[in-house]
Amino acid sequence: MTSPILGIEEITYGAADLDTCRRFFTDWGLALVGDEPGRLTFECLNGCRVVVADPARHALPPAIEDGPTLREVVWGVGDAAALEAVAQRLRGLDGFTDITTPEGWHRVGATDPNGLAYKVQVSTKRPLDLPCAEANTWARKGRIDQPAPMYERARPVEVGHVVFFVRDVAATERHYAQALGFVPSDRYPGRGSFLRCAPEGGHHDLFLLQLPHGKAGLNHVAFTVRDIHEVFGGGLHFSRCGWDTQLGPGRHPISSAYFWYFQNPAGALVEYYADEDQLTGAWQPREFEPGPTVFAEWAVAGGLDGHTRRQKGPAEAPGGKFLTEKR
């Protein structure tokens, strides 16, 4: 099956402390485009939306875990015909919905085996022409008579991927493959699956992790930025704003991406990332045994201080199969 999914259009968090979330996502680099009682709407540069709503004041899909967390993911397709094709596949699945939002967007959706609600709509994201850093390698000199950029803060381009703890990784992967046409990029056999929307694209749009105790929940939401320099500049700014690093900066061996993770008052973690692998239909999924050195080729424990530009606190030895496991 060829997937019509283009990427993430919108995510919705359920969280009660909207004042803190307003400051958090504004500092993160998103534009506040909607501020109504009990509900905030932010936009990335290309129009990808982040909604934070108080579950006591707004009807939201059921939570897959206690506390603030992600309640829904909306995926985008190219046109109405693609949306109708998705609707035909979703009809009859648990939680099937076919609605028109107050904004006039036609959405169809269902519930995955982990209990998460998702929907699909025709994409409203804007095309962008953004200047990005050229890297000079020994083999290719792409930056001539021009210094590499430095960023005072990040302006995320879009929500690039979401990561969930799932009760049954095989059943959840199978659901997204059959319902939406997702394809596997790499796997931790029996423990994790990296999925991308279509054969050609970034390394993963969705990552599913099954912990030994089988708990469902959100691990993190990842925001794409332009290049490695924006990962650093964004992370330093966010540190200066007083927000806590979970891990980073660092680099993932599996996707090759540079990362920086922060604690999120709306639920779990958020990540700045850049420079992930681009794959095609010729790619063959690999299998990895999870462990700290597989998760991170290198990583700075505690983050960097935004003022001194030096590591915060003493370094700690990594532990656990996945460094982003919630304790």
Image (cartoon, rainbow, N blue to C red):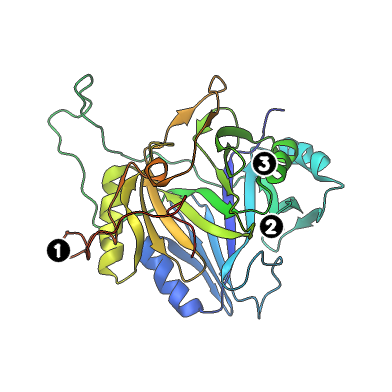
Residue 322 visible in this rendered orientation of the protein: yes
**Crowdedness near tag 1: few (<14), some (14–19) or many (≥20) residues, C-alpha within 10 Å:** few
| C-alpha separation, residue under disc 1 versus residue under disc 3 | 43 Å
Q: Are marks 1 and 3 in contact (CB under 8 Å)?
A: no
Q: Residue flagged by tag 2: what amino acid is it?
A: Leu
Residue at the (63%, 67%) spot, across then down: 65
Q: Position of residue 274 (x, y in %)?
A: 37, 42
Left/right placement of residue 18 relative to residue 170 reads left
Quarter of the image for residue 253 reads top left
Residue underneath mark 1: 308
Residue underneath mark 2: 116
Left/right placement of residue 102 relative to residue 291 reads right
Q: Position of residue 189 (x, y in %)?
A: 59, 37
Secondary structure at numbered mark 3: helix
Q: Are marks 3 and 2 in contact (CB under 8 Å)?
A: no
Secondary structure at numbered mark 2: loop
Q: Residue flagged by tag 1: what amino acid is it?
A: Thr
Which numbered circle lies on residue 173? 3
Indicate which disc, 3 or 2, sits on the residue closer to the N terminus: 2
Up the image or down, 67 lies above or below 170; here it is below
